[in-house]
Amino acid sequence: MLEISRKITRRDAAKRLGAGVLFTFTFESTKAGDAGSELLSSRIHVGDDGAITVLTGKVEIGQGIRTTLAQAAAEELRVPFSQVRLIMGDTALVPDDGGTWGSLTTPQTMPVIRQACASLRELRVRCQAKTYAELAGMPQFSQARAQDSPLTDPKQWKVLGTPVPNVNGPHIVSGKLTYSSDRFPENVLHGKIIRGPNYRSKLLAFDDSKARSLEGVRIVHEENFLGVTAPTRELAEKAAQLIESRWSSGELGDPNLLFDRLRRNAKPVEGGGGRYPSLIQSGSVEQGLASAHRKLNATYQLAYIAHIPLECRTAVAQWTGNRLTVHCGTQAPFLVRSEIAEFFKIPEENVRVIVSDTGSGYGGKHASECELEAARLARGINQPVRLAWTRNEESTCAHCRPAALIDVRSGIDQHGKVIAWDFHNINGGPAGLTPPYEIPNRFAGFHESDSPLRQGSYRSLAAAGNAFARESQIDEMAHLAGLDPLEFRLRNISNERLKTVLLRAADRFGWSGRKAADGTGYGLACNIEKGGHIALCAELEVRASDVHLRRFVAAFDAGAVANPDMLSNQVEGALVQGIGGALFEELRFDRDRITNGVLSRYRVPRFSDVPEIEVILVDRRDQPSAGAGECPITAVAPAIANAIFSATGKRIREMPMLPALRRA
């Protein structure tokens, strides 16, 4: 196995980056929505041959940022795209740009890279260097600081804004691209963890005598942690099966009483500003309801769902003395480094995390779970260890999207204007609480509760559930007002960008004049989330309590479009993923364990579930670029629910919807 656990040196960096000069730019950035002024770093390496390497702490998990960030660099440096490459997610070489989450790469990291590259371009002009290679040969400029250099106006983009193909596209298609799970270093041992029924269980006793009799098998035990290593993965799995272990029950509770439990233990969360405020309030809800012409009370509920990334977690850990190197597929290499260092009580600089391109994450690969387990096994036997989670472990050991109850009271006046809005999310989370509608009297709050399952972030966080409840409620109020759902929304929206995507989607869909018939229904939904503006129209057919999706038309405004192909792919992918949570995805559990952690028991979207999808991009070169990974998924469930109502007259207020539809 390649020795990489020792402290990184200038020679190591040169091997990875090539000969040349590393220009480090440091500057402060204050962006709308940030907690405050934050120090950011962007590093650029200029090779002797003129090749330019951009370094970032962000990672490639299928969203295409390896391509779009390279485009940003090429644009500001005024060089061909082919001249730029990226090194991503290696904590020994790159700056900490935060985790790859929250649709933040495009609005936050791309401007940092653009500013650094623009500064380098201006430096070259001031030094009268004909090429960047010539500039790299000027040692007096080896530690230049970024200046407030002008960025290229998006209206003048020549590289950004164009559909540059995915830089790794051919290797992805051919299978040549190496992912974290493809790493099988020479002489590495394979690990397997022995687990209790659920994350609350405690190890009481175990007998490993049978496993120890197998040649090459070693046992690692530390308090509640029990694992084996072996020369092959098959032998490690066999050894793990031979270990007899006894665990405390750590009961999860009665799944039939889940929502009663959530409501009983709900506690309002006060305050909480920043990106996801837990309380939104203006006017008087009670006065608004008292004066309302029509009122509607409803409760919506969401089941737990799993992330189901294409690639299950894998980590290769190697210790050299008190230094550790971990190759893995995390979304947050610096967070993983910090957590591992804290666990082992060693300096963070003693931990190097190297991230390979990763087969998706969807918010599930943040913490040091598989990585820490691999490091503990490697520490226990003092040899490199490869640990690969199974699909069942991926679905049952990681956190899941929270289950939620959402209570909504609303009222409209005689003119079809929403004048009262009372919205309470229990357990789901605060993301996406703010309605995109003009409502004078409104309250939206998040209530924490006691969850039986381990829960955490999922693509769009709580915004998908909050949009499901909100857009379903808005649709039902439209019918109470006797108005077309599109017209009703337009009456209550002042945001021109949201109006535009609604009208663009509806026009392409042919919304006007469509009427439900013979089990065919039409629904729409819209939302503003993380700077993106989405509108989705859906056509479907209900056949004997089953739903056949026919057509999606989505219009999306994410500001200035950095790469239209990548953006369309992100929108389409989010729409497909949203189908699962809307119709059939649900983690089931009994008192002891999650019972459907394998794909033969956990339903995800199939090719036959995917409708014809058309994506319309509204390219606003006068607006900052927004991320695209999270906003589009928020419109899927409500558009489907509203289309089901159109087709059947049945209002489904549960996710997943198919079980509820069959009970209705």
Image: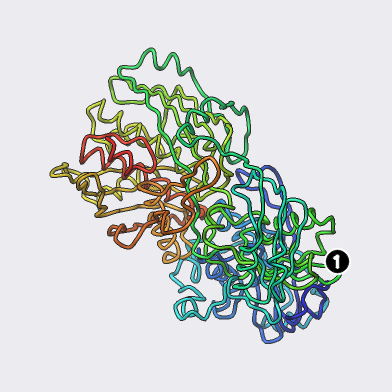
> Which residue matches tag 1?
322
Q: Position of residue 110 (x, y in %)?
A: 59, 61
Q: Quadrant of residue 136?
A: bottom right
User: Measuring 30% from the left and 31% from the top, which residue is drawn there?
Assistant: 476
Residue 219 placement (x, y as % from top left): 74, 65
Give me the residue at 51% from left, 76% from top: 168
Q: How many marks?
A: 1
Which of the pair 185/363 is nearer the observer? 185
> In the picture, which quadrant includes the C terminus?
top left
Relative horizontal placement of residue 606, taking residue 332 as reference (left or right): left
- Left or right: residue 566 versus residue 244 is left
Mark 1 element type: loop
Amino acid at the residue labelled 1:
Asn
Residue 240 in percent (x, y) is at 64, 63
In the figure, residue 348 lies in which quadrant? Answer: bottom right
Position in image of residue 599 (x %, y %): 44, 59
Q: Residue at x 26, y 54 (%)?
A: 551
Q: Is residue 327 visible?
A: yes
Q: Nearer the viewer, residue 392 or 280?
A: 392
Residue at position x 82%, y 64% from top?
350
- Residue furthest to the right in view is 321
Q: Is residue 129 visible?
A: no
Question: Between 584 and 479, which is closer to the camera in this rendering?
Answer: 584
Quarter of the image where the N terminus is located: bottom right
Instruction: Categorize mark 1 by other alpha carbons within 10 Å: few (<14), some (14-19), many (20+).
Output: few
